[in-house]
């Protein structure tokens, strides 16, 4: 193919950030089923979008219907699920988007792998924390009840461990604060880190 | 978690499109190794980005280093590779981005699967076409030479089939046109389909 003159240059990260007024970023919400990750992700995206950011929510349930439809819930498959979500989040952030990931992601090693390779400050780990009994009491999807009846194997918090983040960037006790207050905590962190639209 | 008033609404597809001035879209470049997919993808992204679109290039080589690092080049692994790229492209388009995919994607069934589920007009198949001998003559990556020495199994065009698109949305004979002319052909198609920024 005759290049016919100057070769165009790849669109650089800084050009996207310049256009959007902010950089791509991953906000990773980890916590038990029922802790409030999905609710927070919707509310956080709404706040960010309405303020002018490019945003997207990657929800664990949604990903399992598409990209990860070949995976089950064994420890190996769960790790692979988290690995792929991490790669997609990285791609979206590379495309300039503020990506909100809502995924139980129970193992510290998997979360560390998702963070690895991001420039410093481009990955925010949010521990969406509520006591197990509170999460089980909510049980919006009826999953705890099914797990208690042994209909679900390897259920995080009951028959499979959850490793809490040791030093999350933000921790939200969803049994103690409202959704709006939880969003505020993340917003304030992003503001301190100078990640928001100017 | 106390919702504390009205629950925020999910950011809808139409809101993103309204903000960006265009919808998310997948432009899928298929063709032999050396046909010019990567070169075209860079030039097309540059044109779209400079005109104000949200853009991103998903390049086969790049994806294999990350999301698909667990896959080889057997027919089954190649299909799985294309499936995952299709899902990531769909996610980026859902996030409002015009995604340019540069991937050999030799099998019609895999390409049909990538297109499936997109709203009509949101997926553009581009056949990046040059005769095998032209592609082999370029051989920028030295892959044809290695395949001829039997160092690469299942090499598309030599030891593995390439199924040309029967009705591509756009066909670009890269042995006959310049890069800029190839970009023009895609641009004109997108314009006719009313997919560009107004």
Image (cartoon, coloured by chain):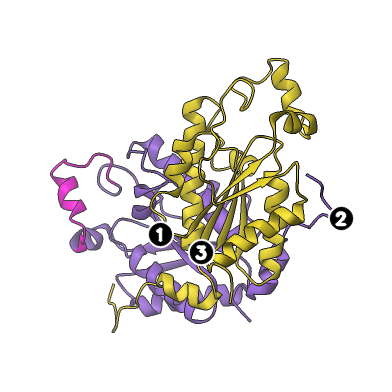
Chain colours: A yellow, B purple
What residue is at 49 percent from the left and 73 percent from the top? A17
Q: Name the residue tied to disc 3.
A: A24
- In this rendering, which labeled residue sits more in front, label 1 or label 3? 1
Chain of residue at mark 3: A
What residue is at 26 percent from the left and 42 percent from the top? B159
Q: Nearer the viewer, residue B119 or A176?
A: A176
Mark 2 residue element: loop
Q: Is residue A21 left or right of residue A139?
A: left
What's the magenta region? Answer: B138-155
Quadrant, the C terminus of chain B: bottom right
Quadrant, the N terminus of chain B: top right
Q: Is residue B56 left or right of residue A160?
A: left
Residue A189 at what x, y percent from top left? 59, 60
User: From what the image shows, is residue A62 above or below residue B49?
Assistant: above
Q: Name the residue tied to disc 1.
A: A119
- Whole-angstrom CA distance, mark 1 to mark 3, is 10 Å
Q: Nearer the viewer, residue A180 or B91?
A: A180
Residue A8 at what x, y percent from top left? 35, 78
User: From what the image shows, is residue B12 above or below residue B17?
Assistant: above
Going from N to C along the chain, the mark reached first, 1 or 3, is 3
């Amino acid at each position: 193919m005759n290049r016919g003159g100057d070769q165009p240059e790849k669109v650089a990260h800084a050009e996207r950030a310049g256009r959007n007024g902010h950089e791509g970023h991953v906000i990773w919400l980890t916590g038990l089923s029922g802790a409030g990750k999905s609710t927070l992700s919707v509310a956080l995206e709404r706040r960010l979008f309405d303020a002018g950011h490019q945003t997207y929510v990657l929800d664990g349930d949604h990903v399992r219907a598409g990209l990860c439809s070949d995976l089950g819930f064994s420890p190996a498959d769960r790790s692979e699920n988290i690995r792929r979500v991490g790669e997609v989040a990285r791609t979206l952030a590379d495309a300039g988007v503020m990506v909100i990931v809502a995924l139980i992601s129970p193992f510290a090693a998997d979360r560390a792998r998702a963070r690895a390779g991001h420039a410093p400050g481009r990955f925010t780990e949010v521990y969406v924390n509520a006591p197990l009994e509170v999460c089980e009491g909510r049980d919006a999807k009826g999953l705890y009840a099914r797990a208690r009846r042994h209909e679900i194997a390897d259920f995080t918090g009951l028959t499979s461990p959850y490793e809490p983040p040791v030093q999350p960037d933000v921790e939200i006790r969803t049994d103690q604060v409202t959704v709006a207050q939880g969003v505020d905590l993340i917003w304030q962190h992003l503001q301190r880190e100078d990640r928001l639209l100017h």
